[in-house]
Amino acid sequence: MDLPHLRSTTDLPKHILDIWVIVLIILATILIMTALVLCPATAVIIYRVRTHPTRNGIV
């Protein structure tokens, strides 16, 4: 005798999970791309501020 598949009320349909996976991938991609753009620019700005001759009193 095969028992029918019992479904609880907490089971979510598969398409809702798929939508959330897609949203999480998009958000992670945006976060990674933003970090790739901002981190080198921030490093260059910090380097130029720290090594600027007029700030250090060299000139």
Image (cartoon, rainbow, N blue to C red):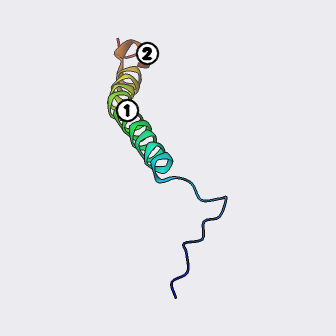
Numbered label attached to residue 56: none
Q: Nearer the viewer, residue 53 or 18?
A: 18
Q: Nearer the viewer, residue 2 or 13?
A: 2
Q: Position of residue 54 (x, y in %)?
A: 39, 12
Q: Residue furthest front?
A: 1
Residue 36 is drawn in which quadrant?
A: top left
Q: Number of labelled discs?
A: 2
Q: Position of residue 38 (x, y in %)?
A: 38, 28
What residue would you read off at disc 2? 55
Which structural element holds mark 2? helix
C-alpha span from label 1 to label 2: 23 Å
Q: Quadrant of the C terminus?
A: top left
From this view, report whether residue 30 is shown above or below residue 55.
below
Q: Residue furthest bottom?
A: 1
Which structural element holds mark 1? helix
Residue depicted at x 50% and y 46%: 16
Q: Position of residue 3 (x, y in %)?
A: 55, 81
Kind of residue indicated by mark 1:
Cys
Q: Nearer the viewer, residue 9 or 50?
A: 9
Whether residues under marks 1 and 2 lie with C-beta atoms below 8 angstroms apart, the answer is no
What residue would you read off at disc 1? 39
Q: Residue furthest right?
A: 9
Kind of residue indicated by mark 2:
Arg
